[in-house]
Amino acid sequence: MDSVLRPYDLGSVQWYVLYQLATAGPILQRDLVRLLSIERATMTGIVATLVRKGLVEQRPDGADQRQKRLSLTAAGAALWSMLPDLTFIRSVAFGGMDEADIAVTVKVLQTATERLEQLLSEGAPS
């Protein structure tokens, strides 16, 4: 994925942020943190880069000024329309696999991630 995106000066997580904004519309930055299961500081850096590139706009949310709402800029939409279709990655990785098996795998990985995040938030035992 990164090699396909390199000519566009994008990384995979930057692509995913653009994907969410292009397909689902504006979103709160904190919701993207949860959706991607990445650290808030990591998301802050990714968003700052996309804002600097002029691809994403970051504004205070109308309902809660403390929260940042992200939206795609005209330049971001134009770039998105030029990006290659990356759906082939899913079909190469998961093609021919049973959807139920994929769903179970996703659930197991989500549960494991949640448990590890819970352990981190409580402070790992010494």
Image (tube, grey):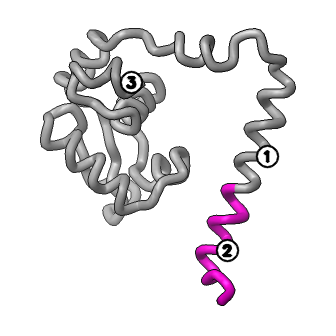
- Describe residue 110's horizontal placement relative to residue 108 as left or right: left
Give residue 99's position: percent from left, percent from top: 81, 20
Callout 2: helix, strand or loop?
A: helix
Q: Looking at the picture, which amino acid does disc 3 mark? A: Ala
Callout 3: helix, strand or loop?
A: helix
- Describe residue 11's horizontal placement relative to residue 19 as left or right: left
Is residue 88 highlighted in magenta?
A: no
Please name which of the two marks, 1 or 3, marks the residue nearer to the observer.
1
Give residue 55's position: percent from left, percent from top: 21, 32
Identify the residue at image location x=48%, y=54%. Answer: 38
Q: Quadrant of the N terminus?
A: top left
Dot placed on the residue nearer the N-terminal end, 2 or 3? 3
Label 2 belongs to which residue? Answer: 119
Label 3 belongs to which residue? Answer: 22
Callout 1: helix, strand or loop?
A: helix
Dot placed on the residue nearer the N-terminal end, 1 or 3? 3
Q: Quadrant of the C terminus?
A: bottom right
Work out how far the residue at label 1 is from the one at label 3, CA to CA, in angstroms: 29 Å
Tell me which segment is drawn in magenta.
113-126
Label 1 belongs to which residue? Answer: 108
Identify the residue at image location x=32%, y=34%. Answer: 11
Give residue 97's position: percent from left, percent from top: 79, 16
Q: Is residue 109 above or below residue 126?
A: above
Q: Looking at the picture, which amino acid does disc 2 mark? A: Leu
| Residue 85 in view (yes/no) | yes
Dot placed on the residue nearer the N-terminal end, 2 or 1? 1
Pointer 2 local density, CA inside 10 Å: few below 14, some 14–19, many at least 20: few
In this rendering, the count of numbered labels is: 3
